[in-house]
Image (tube, grey):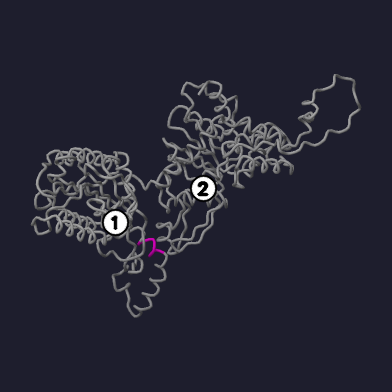
Amino acid sequence: MDSDTADKAWADAVLAAALLAIDAPGCGGALLRAPAGPVRDAWLALLKRLLGPDAAPIRLPLGIADDRLLGGLDLTATLRAGRPVAEPGLLARADGRVLLAAMAERLSPGTAARLNAVLDRGELQVQREGLAATWPARLAVVALDEGAHDDEAAPAALAERLAFRLDLGALPPRTALEDFGLDAAEIAAARQRLRVVETGPDVATALCSVAAQLGIDSLRAPLLALAVARRHAALVGHATVEEEDTIVAARLVLVPRATRLPAPADDEPAPPPEPQPPEPQTPPSDQDADTPPPPPAEDRPLEDQVLEAAVAALPADLLARLKAAEAGRVRAKGDGGKAGDWQRGSARGRPAGVKRGEPRAGQRLDLIETLRAAAPWQRLRQSLLSGTASGTTGGTPNGPAGPLIRVRPEDFHVRRYRQRQSTTTIFVVDASGSSALHRLAEAKGAVELLLAECYVRRDRVAVLAFRGRGADLLLPPTRSLVRAKRCLAGLPGGGGTPLAAAVDAAAALARAVQRQGDTPVLVLLTDGRANVARDGTGGRARAEQDALVSARALAVDGVATLLVDTSPMAAPARQLPSSQPLAGAAALALALRATYLVLPRANAAALSGVVAAHARAAR
């Protein structure tokens, strides 16, 4: 980024900080995309100084629990009073303030949804733990997006509710970070002027028209732009929103949201010029006679002037950015995650809230939530116990003072956990004589590349090899890449092709993996030339028949399978089934209901992509 572009970007960022400080809740907030560094620190320090010492931003912890975010039952006060006492959470305490959300690209969907609801309503409604409370929560959110790639971004629904989108990631640290003389006193004066700033109907019409021509579908964008235009008018001292304020709002709010370039207006007929008295001048050419003179700038509609300014502010590489963002969204949608999907668990993993229930089958009792559920009922239970224990003196049957807290089974709450759903990729390698003669070295190389991809996805791997009269488990399921490569390097070749025994062994291992709660994915590398039957006897016809029977049995289990044909004269990969009779590895793939690839065409990228796709589909 050149110095002029960097200076303009920083000037817009400073102006956005000033407008946000005037009335942050009215703007929704800002999405700041920048890594941690001096540029981001300078912008945050400027915003904090403009907000004033009494309205410093409040930091939102990543992974905050609902009881801290929303509020709930004040356990100590409830036990002391004998009745439910509500305690406000972080959102209620941030009323009128700015909430600073670091690492917004990692916000959980639940937290983002709660922030969206508060930004829409301006209040927080809580109905949980026997409470029904409403607190004012008119706040703004500054989302710090530190994503290194286009597919790592803050939640789109949250970003839609924030007026400003600032991208300072390309600004060099040596940029002269000026504050242009802004101070808290000037911002305080602008807050007072904001109360009397008026807006004409042509401003809203112009902003809606420009948003439509820039391909912005959301109605929140022109509303936020209108709010920004009023705050800019208050900052510069305008009594009403003028053209300058509208242009600034379009540049700061609408331009970063643009999804297309505005269509040219050449197809629209120009209005005929008003009749003018003839003046003696040089006759115009034919081309000039067909084109009416443009109207003066002050006579053009406001929306045309705002659109012209917005188009001038559009980045030159807008189309390239839009294509890159779309590709990132497609990648994010198609990728199930490198480490697998989340699955619910009851004994291990990351905490995922609590639920009502008794601690059975290894579940853990959540003492605090159990006490929260029991606390509101203590006075009632005390009176009921006193009534049933009438005629006794000196206290309750449990002693002079009785139990401090009476807990019943319906109060029990247990913890919930979630953990990554692990995938185990089982490699079944043909080490028979026919394979070793031609393609075993290439098969080993392909497996090593796939092992590296599995390590990146944090999958477990297992290696089965078959030769002679049976199949051997060379490596049980493990995450050790070194062990997998070592056992693969020492794999000998030679002997018959007991394909049926290999399929049976792979099926047994896949079922064992499923019993452990993991998802098996089978990768079978063979030429499909079976010549050893299931009982160990020779005979190609019987061996091929046994292999097909075992393959159909494995297909019933629904294990995701990839078959890589390693025969030296394998036909190009094709869609199965085919109208022509199939033989060898192709027929085995059809019986397994497997994806069929040929080793010469199955390079490392294709193999790893197919294995990853099978892993996502199997979860």
- Image position, residue 85 (x, y; %): 46, 59
Is 356 positioned to the left or the right of 88 in the image? left
User: What residue type is disc 1 on?
Assistant: Arg
Q: Is residue 594 magenta?
A: no
User: Of the residues tagged 1 and 2, which is closer to the observer?
Assistant: 1
Question: Which residue shows up at 25% across the image and 64% down it?
Answer: 361
Is 75 positioned to the left or the right of 600 in the image? right
Question: Which residue shows up at 63% across the image and 32% down it?
Answer: 311
- Image position, residue 404 (x, y; %): 33, 64
> Residue beneath label 1, please?
593
Q: Few, some or many C-alpha atoms within 10 Å of disc 2 (few <14, some 14-19, many ≥20)?
A: few
For the stretch drawn in magenta, the main secondary structure is: helix
Q: Where does the magenta region start and end?
A: 370-375
Secondary structure found at label 2? helix
Q: Nearer the viewer, residue 513 or 545?
A: 545
Q: Earlier in the sequence, mark 1 or mark 2?
A: 2
User: What residue type is disc 2 on?
Assistant: Ala
Q: Few, some or many C-alpha atoms within 10 Å of disc 1 (few <14, some 14-19, many ≥20)?
A: many
User: Which image quarter is the C terminus in?
Assistant: bottom left
- Image position, residue 283 (x, y; %): 85, 21
> Residue beneath label 2, please?
157
| Residue 234 vertical placement versus 561 (above, below) | above
Q: Is residue 371 magenta?
A: yes
